[in-house]
Image (spheres, helix red, strand yellow):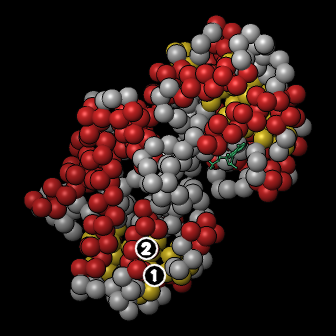
Amino acid sequence: MKLSVIGTGYVGAVHAACMAVIGHEVLGVDTDAAKIAELTQGRPPFYEPGLAELLNRTVRSGRLNFTTSFAEAAAFSDTHFVCVGTPQQPGSLAADLRFLDAAVDALTAEAEGPCLVVGKSTVPVGTAERLANRLRDRDGNGAHEHPEIAWNPEFLREGFAVKDTLTPARLVVGVRSPSADRTLRKVYRPMVNAGVPFISTDPATAELLKVASNAFLATKISFINTMAELCEASGADVVTLANALGEDPRIGHPFLSAGLGFGGSCLPKDIRALSARAEELGVREAVTFLRQIDEINLRQRQRTVDLARTLLGGAFAGRNVAVLGAAFKPDSDDVRDSPALAVAAEIHREGAHVRVHDPEALANARLVHPELDYAATVHDVCDGADIVLHLTEWDLYRGLDPRTLVRLVHAPIVVDARNTLDPVEWRAAGWTVRALGRQAAL
Ligand code: NAD
């Protein structure tokens, strides 16, 4: 099949490459000419494990091409996936759908015959219907067939995006017609034949499913972080508690890691947008808990800052703080709403000299927080530090030798805000180790 993928960021670039891998001819479209220039050379404009190899292979094979031209995309294919950003609106909890509207308008203005526009972006429930009405208003009734709008939400995790796209837990499509259902089954046939469940529903259910999934995951994280505060207050240990909770098959282990909480370009804005949409739909009270989930999550950032300040004797002014991690999660260079950078920036604001390390995200971090100091090695970041804060759980940090680091720092104090360092090993090397929710074990 010939497919276009509009918006070639974290989701779209991976989707485009994976669609080419399963045998389609794909044209990626973006308004960012610099990004398209990189992708045309088979180079990913961001860090995602496995993507460079995939892009290189599919671009060289000729099955994957890129352009900034919507006219080319409309002429190339009659099935278009839309993967543009839907960030939080400035000054509001709601999603900003300007990029989505612009992309759909630009594409459909060029489309001459019937076509299928498949949204992959995360959107408020009712968006597919709104877009369909918009096109009908624009084009009038009866003149020609309107583009059909379907929704196929994306569930990939940054850091595992290639694997999650090629072997997702399930494929969900929200369609209005048997022909849209048939087209999407055909697109995904190799994956469905390999056993991936294919769930076909209406667009509203598909749209809501995506935000429901993120709201549930956010709830699990804020739940365990609430338990962490209770552990601290009572002398219990949240890591042991979470491990034992997760053994219950009704609960499960994933998303029960207590610590600094969630960030990134999805969970925070998606639960806020769901709150805003619930209010529009007249069911604000039904999602009161989502606002608490958000507050609990943001409180972990403040609690981490407070803990570090206490360990430094009550003030940051003039102290050297080493920060391990800038990305919002490991295996990504994405720093959008990064909890690690939020903590680092607040500590800097309170007068500390903050030096940050990250294996992949330093360039992006510098753009957002130029006021912080950055270093390319853990050694350089820790040299002379009064405290070390472990804020993003890269494998690299789990493997650090605390006996080597202890010789570099000014004072051997570490805050493990991700609960992935071995406290016994670090303490044996001479460190004072503190972590959210686990006084008793230390
Ligand atoms: P991104 O910011 O990395 O990429 C969006 C791309 O869209 C950019 O390259 C931008 O230049 C392009 N764009 C903007 N306006 C455009 C237009 N009018 N025409 C063509 N291209 C345009 O965003 P992302 O992280 O890939 O997220 C995309 C969507 O997928 C969002 O709705 C997000 O919530 C959702 N999502 C993201 C993830 C994730 O982990 N990043 C996972 C699941 C779903």
Please identify the quadrant where the N terminus is shown: top right
Seen in the picture, residue 38 relative to 155 is either above or below; the reply is below
Quadrant in the rendering for residue 156: top right
Q: CA distance from mark 2 to mark 1?
A: 7 Å
Kindly identify the residue that appears in the image at 62 percent across and 30 percent down.
Answer: 119
Circles 2 and 1, Cβ within 8 Å, touching? The answer is yes
Residue 109 on image: x %, y %: 79, 30
Q: Residue furthest top?
A: 178
Identify the residue under disc 1: 354
Please identify the quadrant where the C terminus is shown: bottom left
Report the front residue among 421 and 105. 105
> Which amino acid, mark 2?
Ala
96 displayed left or right of 47: left
Residue 129 on image: x %, y %: 56, 22
Q: Is residue 121 visible?
A: yes
Residue 312 on image: x %, y %: 28, 84
Q: Is residue 171 visible?
A: no
Q: Residue furthest left?
A: 234
Looking at the rendered structure, the number of numbered marks drawn on it comes to 2
369 displayed left or right of 227: right
Q: Residues within 10 Å of mark 2 (few under 14, many from 20)?
A: many
Seen in the picture, residue 78 relative to 168 is either above or below; the reply is above
- Give the secondary structure at mark 1: strand
Quadrant in the rendering for residue 149: top right
- Give the secondary structure at mark 2: helix
Kindly identify the residue that appears in the image at 63 percent across and 9 percent down.
Answer: 177
Q: Residues within 10 Å of mark 1 (few under 14, many from 20)?
A: many
Give me the disc on residue 344. Answer: 2
Report the front residue among 58 and 107. 107
Kindly identify the residue that appears in the image at 65 percent across and 56 percent down.
Answer: 47
